[in-house]
Image (tube, rainbow, N blue to C red):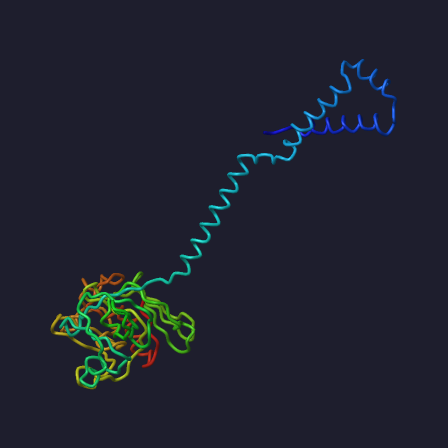
Amino acid sequence: MNCPNRAVHFFDILLIITNKLILKNRLKSDIIRLYLIRGGLSLKKLMILLFILTFLFSGCAKSKPNKPEDVKADENIDENNEVKDDKDKKEKKEEKIYEGEALDTLDKDGIIEVYSERVENVRDNETKEKAIYKLKDFEKVKLLETLPYGWFLVELKDGTKGYVDSRYIRTKEIPPHDFNVKDKGYTLIFTHEDQTLKIYKDGKLIKETIGSSGLWDHFTPRGIFRVQDKIKLYGKIRPSRGEWFYTPRIKQGGKYWVRFSGVYLFHSVPFTEEGKLIKKEAQKLGQPASHGCIRLPVEDAKYIYENIKPGALVLIY
């Protein structure tokens, strides 16, 4: 029940005045009685009336006023915002999960080995004893870390952790890493999303061009790599750059090739065996089109061949 404060104050004042008339001024009872009779009230009735009113309004004075509805609504909004903020903070704390799938586009036997440590040459007789598990094509794995050069730390379904050559893991996104364009020397960064290659020197962008990565079934691996020197490949020591190559299996060749991970190269747009530009393929620059290598305009492939030395950082996203 809501009670006006003015009513409470009125009867408080009336009671005080009466007390003053009776007690402090010590007026004669007959004068008081005469005064009250003229007003239509006896002293007894007045005291009873004051007692009843004081009892009724004393409860109202102690009761708390109701809050306006808009105040309650504001409080509900604040509470909802607090709950939402707590939920957002919780979601931010949750780690993002990166996933990839095993796919052997190189040896094509459908087996991808997981190692207890990073090895020099995968699928080599000397490294077989370090294999702890064999993935099958399209088997899913959780990617925990992107590691140099050309490795992922992965977690299997049973919680086992191991290392997999990134050339055998198809993924659209890789875990973050600390390698970037601030590193000294040359850094080459290729991005699948916009099919562009950017070349940096000592952190400064010096060249940018369009390219073509591999088709989805012949994917270009993502990760941290570096321009390679001579390497052991399929049991033989092989060079890591050249002015020309030709692959009879796909009936295509290319100019100014530079190796960044095994059979994966930077090279020009395709040419025929006779050295004639395949225009249809050249027009595909800017979209996935290759068998896994990164195709570039001839002049840009030549720039890498002539200027980028072994050891230069290669980042593929």
> Is 119 above or below relative to 269?
below
Viewer-side residue, 164 vs 116: 116
> Is 163 above or below relative to 7?
below
Residue at x 19% of width, y 74% of height: 134
Quarter residue 54 falls in: top right
Viewer-side residue, 264 vs 116: 116
Residue at x 76% of width, y 27% of height: 15
Residue 199 in the image, given as x and y percentages of width and height:
36, 71
Viewer-side residue, 174 vs 30: 30
Quarter residue 241 falls in: bottom left
Q: In which quadrant will I find the C terminus?
A: bottom left
Residue 101 in the image, given as x and y percentages of width and height:
23, 66
Residue 16 in the image, given as x and y percentages of width and height:
78, 29
Quarter residue 35 falls in: top right
Classify residue 198 as left or right of residue 250: right
Q: In which quadrant will I find the N terminus?
A: top right
Classify residue 11 as left or right of residue 186: right
Q: How many marks?
A: 0
> Is 33 above or below relative to 146?
above
Residue 269 in the image, given as x and y percentages of width and height:
22, 68
